[in-house]
Image (cartoon, grey):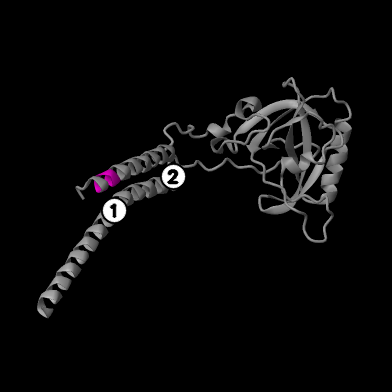
Amino acid sequence: MVRPQWIGMLLLCLVVAGVFAWLGQWQLGRAIDTDPPPPGATEQVRPLDEVAAPGEYLPEPLVGQRAGTAGSWVPGDFLVVESRFNDGVEGYWVTGQLRLTTPERPTSIAVALGWAATEDEALAAIERLEAEASDPRVLVDVSGRLISDEGPLPPPSGADPQTMTRMSPAALLGRWHDVDDLDVYRPYLASSAPFGGLTAIASPAPDESSNVNWLNIFYAAEWAVFAGFAFYLWYRLARDAWEKEVEDLEDLDDAAGDEATAS
């Protein structure tokens, strides 16, 4: 172990173990949120542009955050999303494209306006909403929970190809009008107050998350094991080399003894 080649190998293992230790410390730093949001922070209505930005994913602490904004509905973009449950009852959501008033560039956000028990009720609400949206000068204030995109899914087998069962702004964008050079928010807004005579969407406050990420702690422990394994590998290689030398010496001694006996 004190030979130059094994001392050099030990120095290399020290470097590798140091890198692993740094990675473990980095994971440990990410595992504990030293500045968690205060309890009930999601229940304070904040301006939408302070919570998220168009085209960006919604950070985990802000999922379910109450946010408010203003704009006008885009006619022809009120669409139905099926298989939406309200207090355990399956029904339909009516969604719309809200063109915001404040940004300089055209910007929209998908809004879930309310829930209906039947498809006929949802379609009747769309008729009322289309009548209200005929004048683009009519502005509406919308506040609700900001929720991440659920991701699109293909329609059920045998259903209309236009059927939507997931609240996905990406899928809605593909069916909206007037979208040239349009900035769109990735999350959607589940309105607290219903529009068009619909029922309010049941949207309870998100559970308060722990400020400890156990997955990151597990990763930190893994890096510590890897750092220890680097030293074990050095020891094992050096011991194997030593044992081979001992075996070679024993073989030479045996060969010399056999020669002496033969003579």
Image-based side of 113 in relation to 187, left or right:
right
Q: Quadrant of residue 157?
A: bottom right
Q: Residue at x 58, y 29 (%)?
A: 44
Q: Given the image, on which type of amino acid does mark 1 rest? A: Tyr
Left/right placement of residue 226 relative to residue 166 reads left
Q: Which residue in the protein does label 2 denote?
A: 216
Secondary element at image label 2: helix
Residue carrying label 1: 232
Query: Looking at the rendering, which quadrant does residue 249 occupy?
Result: bottom left
Magenta segment main secondary structure: helix
- Amino acid on which the number 2 mark rests in the picture: Asn
200 vs 119, left or right, is: left
Return the disc, 2 or 1, that comes first in the chain's sequence: 2
Residue, far front? 263
Label 1 SS = helix
Asked whether residue 199 is in view, the answer is: no
x and y percentages locating residue 119 in the rendered image: 82, 50
Q: Residue at x 53, y 43 (%)?
A: 207
Segment colored magenta: 6-10
The one of 161 and 17 positioned closer to us in this rendering:
17
Q: CA distance from mark 2 to mark 1?
A: 24 Å
Q: Reply yes or no: does residue 7 show up in magenta.
A: yes
Q: Nearer the viewer, residue 190 or 25?
A: 25
**Image location of residue 137, percent across then percent down:** 84, 22
